[in-house]
Image: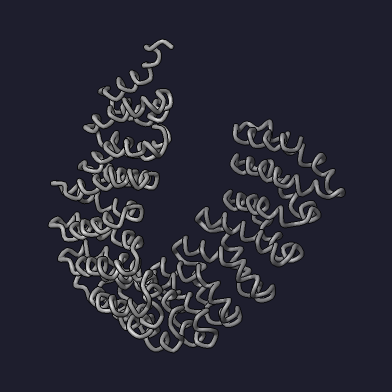
Amino acid sequence: MNPEVELYPIAILIDELRHDDVSLRLNAIKRLNTIALALGPQRARDELIPFLDESIDDEDEVLLALASELGNFVEYIGGAQFAHILLPPLENLAAVEETMVRDKAVESLNKICPALSQAQLEQFYIPLVKRLTLGDWFTSRTSATGLYAAGYTLATPASQEDMRKSFGQLCMDDTPMVRRAAATHLGSFAKKFGKEHLISDIIPLFNKLAQDEQDSVRLLTVTDLVAIAEELSPEECKTYFLQPLKTMVADKSWRVRYMIADNFVKLSKAVGEEITREDLVVAFVRLLKDNEAEVRTAAAGQVPGLAQLIDRETILTYILPCVRDLVTDTSQHVRAALAMHISGLAPILGKESTTEHLLPLFLQLLKDEFPDVRLNIISKLETVNEVIGIELLSQSLLPAIVELAEDKQWRVRLAIIDYIPLLATQLGVQFFDEKLGALCMSWLGDSVFSIREAATVNLRKLTEVFGVDWAKQSIIPKVLAMGTHPNYLYRMTTIFAITAMAPAVTPEVIRDYILPTVTNMVSDPIPNIRFNVAKSIEALIPVLSQNADTKPLVDQQLKPALVKLGEDTDNDVRFFSQKALLAVQ
């Protein structure tokens, strides 16, 4: 083979990597695997990797792409036995200034580490981690914290001891960024330990970080506590973690308290039910009453999860009074979070307690001035319905639901529409016609298109629930009457409703009721209506074709209508009518 041809790919790469244009350099990096394949493993090891190692001084986006590519490069340099060759360039990338590049380099090193043999690990990986750990700049020490967990289990006992000591140094580093990184990775590192070292080495480090002067370090220890507690027995958790937990709940920084509140159910599960019942309920009550709205919001989201871990009596005595206070909380975000999660208490408390304690709270939240609160409570009513039944629910909450159906916030109206078919299923025809029938029709004339659209879909779902005979009497005449309304938006809604309902009604209903209206609207003066008529005809044809009696109507009435629309002056009308005609062919 001609040596010049053989060198050509690497020549292109080197040219592009040294090019002034960043996009060309970036493109070259993203094609590294192609170049490596062209070169073969030997030359990729001998030429490509050393060259890349020298190219570390570049734009951050190029370095980010390089760090990402190298993580998947083991197969291109001859497999796992040569994987250590990729470590030097990644070590350099793990020490650069840009955080995203360092993180990606650490991620790639963690990908390569499992492919290394113990000999490679001892000879190349562990010394790399040590060098980064002892680096002068905090950037390299920050990266080092993320590399201990991957290599620990593969290392020899002597190296493992060394790694534990080195990680301990990073946890006590002078730079807060390094301590923060150590706190971030402490939990994953702890998972690799046996219980003996977990108690002797990791817990002292956790305690040190949990008392750090920087709240940005302390808040990260919350997830560490969960990770470590999962490895210990409930008795050990009580011995080692009860006091730190109490301290965290009372931390002077709201961000630490927020993290505790946000992870409270995970913490409770990790430390066990006994500690949760005896000690954590009081701590949780404290968080629900916290003076910071963010903390109360996070705690409100944990209420149903914690309630599953404690007995009913404790919920009623300790948790429910706090929930009652949160219903009238000054912060709308706290009330919205509570509205989203409060229904989760219903299955735990049972029918009697839900009716007595929760229903009044639901009613209060349904009347909240903030739309998101009302929206959240509506979207979760199904859970309550399963517990107390529709009769009780409709008696107590239906007036509020009807009121919300006319809410000035269209998203609230939309949520109510989505809930109506479910309500209809459980209420029955008579009750529905009395209380909600007029409401469903009024939405068809709403000023917001999304509401009108949802209302037409709602009619189809109701037809599926109550049957075609009901639709024939209660809905279809009213919908068709709108087809002659002087306002074109009402006529448009008729077409949308017909199209939406077509799959749910019988061919006979389409023939007797719907078809005359559709054929009349072919001559509507508004082009938007005419092209929607063409789309509606396209939806009606498959339904009419199912029945031998109605199939001739396709050729007798619908095709001529489409032909007429196909000669329309408006482009859109012609397009949709021709599309419908093609579907008929």
In the image, farthest residue toward the right: 549
Q: Which quadrant: the N terminus?
A: top left
Quadrant housing residue 322:
bottom left
- Whether residue 516 is visible to the viewer of this picture, yes or no, is yes
Residue at x 37% of width, y 69% of height: 231
Residue at x 40% of width, y 39% of height: 80
Q: Which quadrant: the C terminus?
A: top right
In percent of width and height, residue 208 lies at: 19, 67
Residue nearer the viewer, 528 or 82: 82
Residue at x 36% of width, y 38% of height: 83
Residue at x 53% of width, y 66% of height: 416
Residue nearer the viewer, 419 or 64: 64
Q: Is residue 164 above or below residue 356?
A: above
Colour scheme used in the picture?
A: one colour
In percent of width and height, residue 305 lies at: 43, 74
Residue nearer the viewer, 339 or 172: 172
Q: Is residue 17 above or below residue 307?
A: above
Residue nearer the viewer, 576 or 223: 223
- In the figure, is residue 373 to the left or right of 228? right
Count of labels in the image: 0
- Whether residue 332 is visible to the viewer of this picture, yes or no, is no
- In the figure, is residue 435 to the left or right of 260? right
Quadrant housing residue 57:
top left
Quadrant housing residue 373:
bottom left
In percent of width and height, residue 162 lies at: 23, 56
In percent of width and height, residue 16 lies at: 31, 22
Q: Is residue 399 above or below residue 45?
A: below
